[in-house]
Structure formats: structure tokens, C-alpha cells
Amino acid sequence: MEKLTIAQIEEKLTGMDSWEYVDGAIETSLQFGNFKEAFASMTRIAFECEAQGHHPDWSNVYNSLHIRLNTHDVGGVTVKDFQLAETIEKIIFGD
């Protein structure tokens, strides 16, 4: 898997309003109505992460969820990170 350039990352982030490039990864922060909604979304995301064989760095505090994606093997962002980000967007925001 090949590490993307900053220009490639910025191009792929076009149209993905909830994501940004920060210090070698793409990140998003999400807010939910309560802890149960946040945790339910994390559970749905976890199943997709496992299916894709790619796991985020993430944190949850009450109704907020912060997700950070990069491919540790190559030390940066790859297509694999964008595939998972798109899946996460579909889970959270629908098709």
C-alpha cells in the first residue's frame, strides 16, 4: 500500500466535510444525542473496521467520538484510510 501525498489527501478530502488532515492522519469529531447513540455508532463502525482489517485510533467521551485514521505500516495516509472514512460516513450520515 502506497502512502498518499498531501496534495492527494487534500483532493480526496474534497466533499468529505467532516474530515480534515492533521499531523499525518485524517480525523473527524462527531457529536451524538447521548452516550448510548455514540456507543451504538462505535459498535457499527467496529464491525466494519474488522471486516476491512483496518482499525482507527479513536476516543469516546459521553456523546462525542473522535476518530483518527492512518496506515501505521506505511507511516501515513493511504487509500485504505479513505475507504474506511467513507464507510464511517455512510454509517453516521447515511448514503
Image: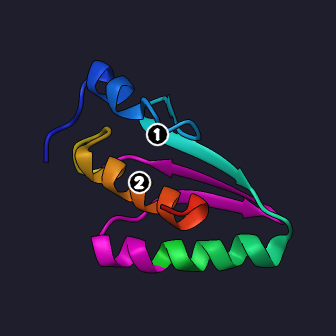
Q: Residue furthest front?
A: 95
User: Magenta stretch: residue 64 in it?
Assistant: yes
Cβ–Cβ under 8 Å for marks 2 and 1: no
Identify the residue under disc 1: 26
- Numbered label attached to residue 13: none
Residue 34 on image: x %, y %: 86, 70
Q: Residue at x 47, y 61 (%)?
A: 95
Residue 6: % across, % down: 32, 22
Which quadrant of the figure has residue 63? bottom right
Render colour scheme: rainbow
- Image quadrant in which you'd find residue 14: top left
**Mark 2 or 1, which is nearer the eye?**
2
Res 36 → quadrant: bottom right
Q: Secondary structure at mark 1?
A: strand
Apparent side of residue 95 relative to residue 93 in the rendered image (left or right) = left
Looking at the image, residue 94 sits to the left or right of residue 14; the answer is: right
Q: Nearer the viewer, residue 58 or 40?
A: 40
Real-space Cα separation, disc 2 to disc 1, in angstroms:
12 Å
- Looking at the image, is 60 positioned above or below residue 48? above
Residue 24, placed above or below residue 52:
above
Residue drawn 70% across the image and 76% down it: 39
Mark 2, residue position: 86
* Label located before the other in sequence (2 or 1): 1
